[in-house]
Amino acid sequence: MKGLNTKEEEKPMDDKQILDLYWERSEAAISETSKKYGKYCRYIAFNILHNDEDSEECVNDTYLRAWNSIPPNRPSVLKTFLGKITRNLSLDRYELLNAKKRNGGQMPLILDEIQECIPSLDSTENIVEEIALTDILNRFLSSLSLEQRKIFMRRYWYLSPIKEIATEYDMSESKIKMSLFRSRNELKKLLEKEGISV
C-alpha cells in the first residue's frame, strides 16, 4: 500500500489541478509546475542561451511570471503558456547578453535563416512572435506535412540545433537543412502572396 501511495505522489498533477492551485494562491502551484514542466522550460531556455545558470534564471522567472499572471488569466494550454513565457524571457536575456558581447551560440544563424523570408521590422524576435499569432503562419504550418511542420517548429520555435533535430528524427543533417530551406521558401511565397514583402 505504501508503494502505491508513493507512486501516486510522484505522478504529476494534471493541468487543471495545477491551475486550480494558482487560483487558490497556493505555493504548491510553483512546485507542481516545476515538476511537470521544468525540463520542458529548461530545454527552451538552454537552446536560446546555451548557459545553465542563465537558463535556470529564466525558468524561475517563468514561474514568477506565471504566478503573477494566473489569475486573472487561465490558459487553455498550460504547456504552451509556459513555453511562450520562457521563450520570451530567454530571448530578452539573449539580447541583453549579446549587447554585452558575452554570448554567441546559434541564435544569429537561426535568425539569419528566418530573416530570408520574414520582412525586417524592429527585430526578428518580435516579428517571429507577431507572425506566430497570425492567421498567415497558422495556414502556413497547416499546409506543411507533419514531418516538415515538426522540423520547422523545432528549429524556429524551440531553436534546436540542426544536429539535434537530425538525431531525433533519424535523418541526415542535409535532409533537415533541405526541409527547412523548402519550408522557408514556401513561407516566403505565402507572405508575398498575402502582400507582405520581405
Image (cartoon, rainbow, N blue to C red):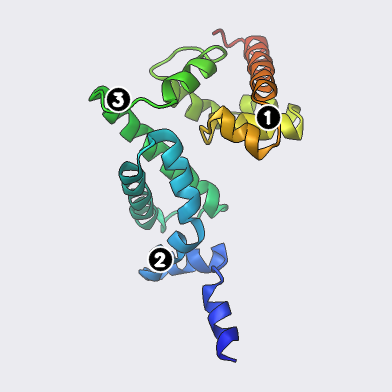
Residue 197 is situated, as x and y percent measured from the top left of the image, at 56, 7
Residue at x-position 42% and y-position 40%: 46
Classed neighbour count for the residue bearing mark 1: other residues with Cα under 10 Å, few (<14), some (14–19), many (≥20): some
Q: Amino acid at mark 2?
A: Ser
Marking on residue 31: 2
Marking on residue 141: 1
Residue at x-position 45% and y-position 12%: 120
Residue 18 is situated, as x and y percent measured from the top left of the image, at 49, 66
Classed neighbour count for the residue bearing mark 3: other residues with Cα under 10 Å, few (<14), some (14–19), many (≥20): some
Marking on residue 98: 3
Image height of 158 relative to 116, above or below: below
Residue at x-position 57% and y-position 86%: 3
- N-terminal label among 1 and 3: 3
Image height of 6 relative to 165, above or below: below
Q: Find numbered disc 3 in the image and state the secondary structure of the residue it sits on.
A: helix
Q: Amino acid at mark 3?
A: Asn
Image height of 58 relative to 143, above or below: below
Q: Find numbered disc 2 in the image and state the secondary structure of the residue it sits on.
A: helix
Residue 41 is situated, as x and y percent measured from the top left of the image, at 46, 48
Nearer to us in this view, 14 or 161: 161
Q: CA distance from mark 2 to mark 3?
A: 31 Å
Marking on residue 21: none
